[in-house]
Image (cartoon, rainbow, N blue to C red):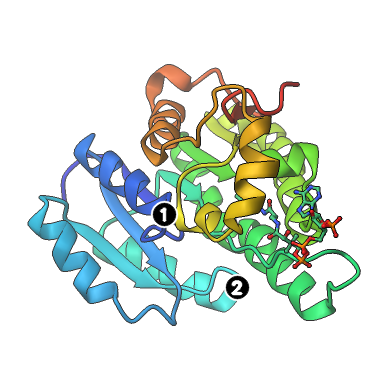
C-alpha cells in the first residue's frame, strides 16, 4: 500500500461522485467509492475507470443503513486502508409538493441524505482523531439554505447536514480533523436534468446570475481544496458554489 491518503466517496458513481472520485484519483489519492446495492453497472464502471487510469475500489452500500455502512467501510479498510477523507456525497431527491408528500418519500430522503452522515462518519471519525488528521466533507445543497418548491424533504435533510457539520467540527477540531459542508447549486447532473425542462428554463435558470448550470468539475475542485493541507484552517464552514443564485 502506498502512503497516499485514502478518500472514500459515497455515491461515487453518480453525477457528481464520478467526477469527484476520478479527479481525486488523478490528484494522487487512493480512492474508494460506494454504490447503491441496486446498481447493476458497478463492475463495468470499475473497468471503465481502470481503462481511464483510475484504480478505484467500489463497494456496495446502502448509506441509509448503519449495518451496510459498517460492512462497506470494513472492506475499504481491508483493501485500501484507513479512510483519511470522507466525502458524504450520496443523495436522492423525491420531489413533490408538500400536499402530495407521503411518509415513504419523506423517510427515504431523510434517511439517505441525513442519517447517512451519522452512518458513514461513525465508521471513520474515531480513526481520524486517533491518527490526528482527517477531513469530512458533507455535500449539502443551495436548497438546504434557501428552500425549494417541491422539496420539503430534501431541503430539511440538506439543512440538517450543516447542523451536523458544525457540531462535529467543534468536537474534533483539536485533533486536526476538519468537517465542512459544501452547498452546490444547480449542477449539470442527472439529478438536475430530471427537473421538467419548462421548470428548469422558467423557474430555475433565471435565478442564476451566471446564467448557466454549474459543472461537476467545479464542485470536485472545491472538494480537492477542502481535502488539502492548505485547507487545514477551514472547519465548520458552509461553502456555497451556486453561480450567485443564493448569497448569504
Ligand atoms: N417555483 C414556483 N412555482 C412552481 C415551481 C417553482 N420552482 N415549480 C412548479 N411551480 C408551480 C407550477 O408553475 C404550477 O403552477 P400553476 O398551477 O399555477 O401552473 C404549480 O406549481 C404546480 O406545478 P406542477 O404541475 O409541476 O406540479 P407537480 O405536482 O406535477 O410537480 C414538482 C411539482 C414535483 C415540484 C415539479 O414542479 C418539480 O419537479 N419542480 C422542480 C423541483 C426542484 O427544483 N428540484 C430540484 C432538483 S435538483 C436538486 O435538488 C439538486 C440540488 O441540490 C440543487
Other-residue count near label 2 (Cα within 10 Å), few / some / many at <14 / 14–19 / ≥20? some
Q: Position of residue 38 (x, y in %)?
A: 44, 82
Q: Is mark 2 within 8 Å of ligand 1?
A: no
Residue 138 higher or lower than 96, as above or below? above
Q: Which mark is residue 248?
A: none
The residue drawn where x is 51% and y is 77% is 68
Side (left or right) of 100 relative to 120: right
Q: Position of residue 230 (x, y in %)?
A: 41, 17
Of tags 1 and 2, the one toward the viewer is: 1
The residue drawn where x is 80% and y is 44% is 147
Q: Is residue 29 visible?
A: yes
Query: Residue 64 appears in which quarter of the rendering?
Result: bottom right
Q: Position of residue 22 (x, y in %)?
A: 26, 46
Q: Earlier in the sequence, mark 1 or mark 2?
A: 1
Q: Which mark is residue 15?
A: 1
Residue 175 higher or lower than 35, as above or below? above
The residue drawn where x is 25% and y is 65% is 79
Residue corresponding to mark 2: 66
User: Which quadrant is home to the C terminus?
Assistant: top right
Determine the secondary structure under disc 2. helix
The residue drawn where x is 41% and y is 41% is 216
Residue 246 higher or lower than 13, as above or below? above
Amino acid at each position: 500500500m502506498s502512503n497516499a491518503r485514502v478518500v472514500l466517496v459515497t455515491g461515487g458513481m453518480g453525477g457528481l461522485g464520478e467526477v469527484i472520485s476520478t479527479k481525486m484519483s488523478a490528484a494522487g489519492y487512493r480512492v474508494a467509492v460506494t454504490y447503491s446495492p441496486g446498481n447493476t453497472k458497478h463492475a463495468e464502471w470499475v473497468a471503465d475507470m481502470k481503462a481511464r487510469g483510475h484504480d478505484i475500489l467500489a463497494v456496495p452500500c446502502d448509506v441509509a443503513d448503519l449495518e451496510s455502512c459498517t460492512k462497506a467501510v470494513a472492506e475499504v479498510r481491508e483493501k485500501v486502508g484507513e479512510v483519511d477523507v470522507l466525502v458524504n456525497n450520496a443523495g436522492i431527491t423525491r420531489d413533490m409538493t408538500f400536499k402530495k408528500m407521503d411518509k415513504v418519500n419523506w423517510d427515504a430522503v431523510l434517511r439517505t441524505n441525513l442519517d447517512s452522515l451519522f452512518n458513514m462518519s461513525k465508521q471513520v471519525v474515531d480513526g481520524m482523531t486517533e491518527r490526528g488528521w482527517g477531513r469530512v466533507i458533507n455535500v449539502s445543497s443551495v436548497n438546504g439554505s434557501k428552500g425549494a418548491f417541491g422539496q420539503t424533504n430534501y431541503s430539511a435533510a440538506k439543512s440538517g447536514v450543516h447542523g451536523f457539520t458544525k457540531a462535529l467540527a467543534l468536537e474534533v477540531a483539536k485533533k486536526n480533523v476538519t468537517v465542512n459542508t459544501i452547498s452546490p447549486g444547480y449542477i449539470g447532473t442527472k439529478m438536475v436534468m430530471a427537473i421538467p425542462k419548462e421548470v428548469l428554463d422558467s423557474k430555475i435558470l433565471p435565478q442564476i446570475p451566471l446564467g448557466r448550470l454549474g459543472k461537476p468539475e467545479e464542485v470536485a475542485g472545491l472538494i480537492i481544496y477542502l481535502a488539502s493541507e492548505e485547507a487545514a484552517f477551514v472547519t465548520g464552514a458552509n461553502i456555497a458554489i451556486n453561480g450567485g443564485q443564493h448569497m448569504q
